[in-house]
Amino acid sequence: DAKSMKEEATVWELPFYSPREVRTLYYSSPFLRISPPFLLFFVLFVSFVVYSSAEAQPPRAQAETAE
């Protein structure tokens, strides 16, 4: 257990040293491999949805009511 924890800690430290080890970190952790691109997309998507609902929806509702 302690050995695997020590190895994991090493893997966590590696990204600070070079891009090649960053790739190692992504491969060693499925969550981190999926998370950064997905998280970026998710943040942009949520921002777009919030912006759309805040800015575009009321005028659209008014336009539908006017028609």
Image (cartoon, rainbow, N blue to C red):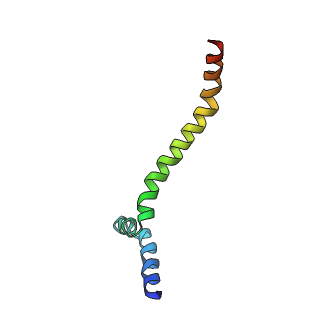
Of the pair 56 and 17, the residue shown nearer to us:
56
Left or right for 39, reference 53: left
* 34 in relation to 16, above or below: above
Of the pair 62 and 55, the residue shown nearer to us:
62
Q: Please tell me in which quadrant of the rendered image residue 67 appears.
A: top right
Q: Residue at x 41, y 73 (%)?
A: 14
Q: Please tell me in which quadrant of the rendered image residue 19 appears.
A: bottom left
- Please give the count of numbered marks on the rendered protein: 0
* 32 in relation to 6, above or below: above
> Residue 42 at x, y = what percent?
50, 48
Q: Please tell me in which quadrant of the rendered image residue 25 appears.
A: bottom left
Residue at the top extreme, as displayed: 67
Q: Residue at x 42, y 58 (%)?
A: 34
Residue at the left extreme, as displayed: 20
Residue at the bottom extreme, as displayed: 2
> Residue 13 at x, y = what percent?
45, 74
Left or right for 49, reference 58: left
> Residue 9 at x, y = what percent?
47, 78
> Residue 35 at x, y = what percent?
46, 58
Q: Residue at x 41, y 65 (%)?
A: 30
